[in-house]
Amino acid sequence: MRTPTRRTALGAGIALAGGGLLAACSGSGSGSDHSGHGGPAARDYVSPDGKEVAAAESAREPGAVRKVRLTATPSTLDLGGRTVRSWSYGEALPGKEIRVTAGDTLEATLANHLPQSTSVHWHGLALRNDMDGTPGLSQAPVKAGASFTYRFATAHPGTYWLHPHSGVQQDRGLYAPLIVEDPKEPLRYDKEWVVVLDDWVDGVDGSTPDAVLAELRKGMAGMDHDGMDHGGMDMEHEGMDMGLGRSGGAGRVTTASWTAARKGPGPSGPPRMMMGATSDLLGGDAGDVAYPYYLVNGRTADDPQTFRAEPGDRVRIRFINAGGDTAFRVALGGHRMTVTHTDGFPVTHTGTDALLLGMGERYDVLVTVKDGVFPLTALAEGKKRTARALLRSGGGAAPKASARPKELDGKLLRADQLTADASVRLKGGKPDRTIELRLTGSMEKYDWAINGERYDPARRHPVRAGERVRLSFVNNTTMWHPMHLHGHTFSLGSSGPRKDTAIVLPGRTVHADFDADNPGLWMLHCHNVYHSESGMMTVLGYLK
């Protein structure tokens, strides 16, 4: 098959991104986009490979080139006692870690050996727009059998990761850590561990993420509720009402019907829709999907990875939530953690027992190791299942897989309780433009959207370079949403942490401010892969 060059593939992507007239109202105080009201046309927006993008990349002063190769391929993966067929990078789960130094130019060639088109999104990086990896917006899809080379400067040190932005491919095994080291690293530690959290369904009893999405898209109103997973709740009470946290209600379920429904998989695997998964930390409803496994670094809790250290060692742990539909509450038994970074950017050091990570979020912590064997536990929040690894610094038996460290119920730190380190704090100033993003939809119809409109790449919220922009996420739904902005980081409050992904609880509003300093067309979406693929995505577009 002919392999397109970067330029021909990009040109097709620009045609997709720029086609049609774009409507927006762009008054000085609002970024709202109202299709059909005579707003900017496609030619008024900076294109992903425009001169403005090239100028911003030049300002990053690209350094030494680090070349890597990513091969996306069907794979047989060992989850630890369970073998599944899935897709992955280089037949490994997670994919092999990529590590560069801030200022380096990363040149990553993706070879697509999958049966369908794909892409790579470099989650959290402020990189050039045409390398962002969003098909139909910043590039054309990388077709089956083709390849594409991503090349960009890595400006900011931190903990990042990579994954596709094509359908629900992210909920397979297509993800890997990306660590950008600080050449002037201020932290001192003896060891460093990267811990990737995931929820897993692909290849289990015939399930695929595409089949899960198809099931969810039927909506709760049209479902046979006897076949649904109910979040591990006590099923001994006949006729238990399982309508918790759903806008559409859920009917009733009995032990007999539950047992009958779970006897074997259907043509697309057993039902995976989840009901009754609730969490006060998440404002009620915890998630849509009942995953059969939860993983730490690709391993189940029954066959965990073991990290080794000496008593007294100071260890840096980089946590990444690569899950599709699950928030994880994380704790290291017998230890307190000191949070040093979130989403790659430093914060004032703060102690905690536990952390809550929404999909796409990252946290770096420091831990001083004690003597013994300890569980590093990731509770699937609201779903009553756990993933884990082990820390071994001495003799003794490993705790059982069911062990739940008391730290999980101890002090838990939220992102809005953190303060940005002074070196990365946004300068003071009022926003030049406020964009209200109402998060809408329900489980009943599975019609997730932003401002009541499902994703359309031709619909953009206009911004101008140099503006201070405020994103106001207004959650009008009964579910929580981890909202992610491509190509930028925002500040939660005047001195809050710098982040690219933030949890927005039901009925709450979160204000996120950023400086418009990276021109192009940028995706903004919920990082629940099933919500985003159902329509909870939109675009921020820089005006020329």
Image (cartoon, rainbow, N blue to C red):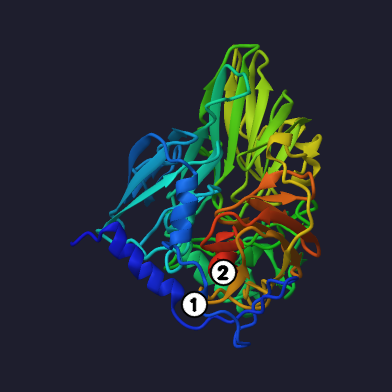
Where is residue 261, by image quadrant? bottom right
x, y percentage for residue 180? 50, 35
Number of marks: 2
- The residue under the point 56% across, 76% down is 459
Q: Is residue 406 visible?
A: yes
Left or right, 196 with reference to 352: left
**How packed is label 1: few (under 14 Cα within 10 Å), some, or many (20 or more)?**
many
Tell me if label 2 and label 1 are in contact, CB under 8 Å. no
Residue 314 in the image: above or below residue 129? above
x, y percentage for residue 375? 64, 28
Residue 195 in the image: above or below residue 235? above
Q: Amino acid at mark 1?
A: Ala
Mark linked to residue 15: none
Identity of the residue furthest to the left in this view? 1
Mark linked to residue 42: 1
Where is residue 108, by image quadrant? top left
Residue 29 in the image: above or below residue 7? below
Mark linked to residue 543: 2
Q: Is 405 in front, or is 492?
A: 492
- Under circle 2, the secondary element is loop
x, y percentage for residue 127? 49, 50
- Under circle 1, the secondary element is helix
**How packed is label 2: few (under 14 Cα within 10 Å), some, or many (20 or more)?**
many
Q: Is 508 in front, or is 196?
A: 508
